[in-house]
Amino acid sequence: MVVGGAEGYVRQSDLAGVVEHYALNPTLGAEANVWLRVVGSGADWLFRQRVAPAAVVAVDLMERDGARDQIAGVTLAANL
């Protein structure tokens, strides 16, 4: 969860349904308040829990452009 928005993972095969069900607008760009990481087939293990594994979140944060996100990812990974 991020302040002022929500962030999560969605299967590629479920993306269209999630966008329609929640009336998401993918054209908002920088103004978006929901961010979905689309996961391809073969990663069904990611959805066996309600919350994404900390290691997955840490790697996602470290791969982002912003220094704040990267530091948060490194800090999370160091505490695993």
Image: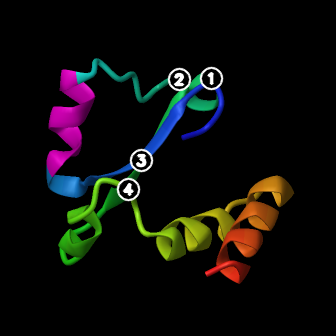
Residue 61: image quadrant is bottom right
Label 4 vs 1, first from the N-terminus: 1
Q: Quadrant of the C terminus?
A: bottom right
Mark 1 residue crowding within 10 angstroms, few (<14) / some (14–19) / many (20+): few
| Spatial CA span between label 2 and label 1 | 5 Å
- Amino acid carrying label 4: it is Val
The disc label shown at residue 8, or none:
3
Say which of marks 2 and 4 sits in front: 4
From the viewer's side, name the closer residue of 54 and 28. Answer: 54
Tag 3 and tag 1, C-beta contact below 8 Å: no
- Check if mark 2's residue and mark 1's residue have beta carbons within 8 Å: yes
* Residue type at the position of mark 1: Glu
Q: Earlier in the sequence, mark 3 or mark 4?
A: 3
Residue extending farthest to the front is 79
Rendering quarter of residue 65: bottom right
Task: Give me the residue at 65% from left, 31% from top.
Answer: 3
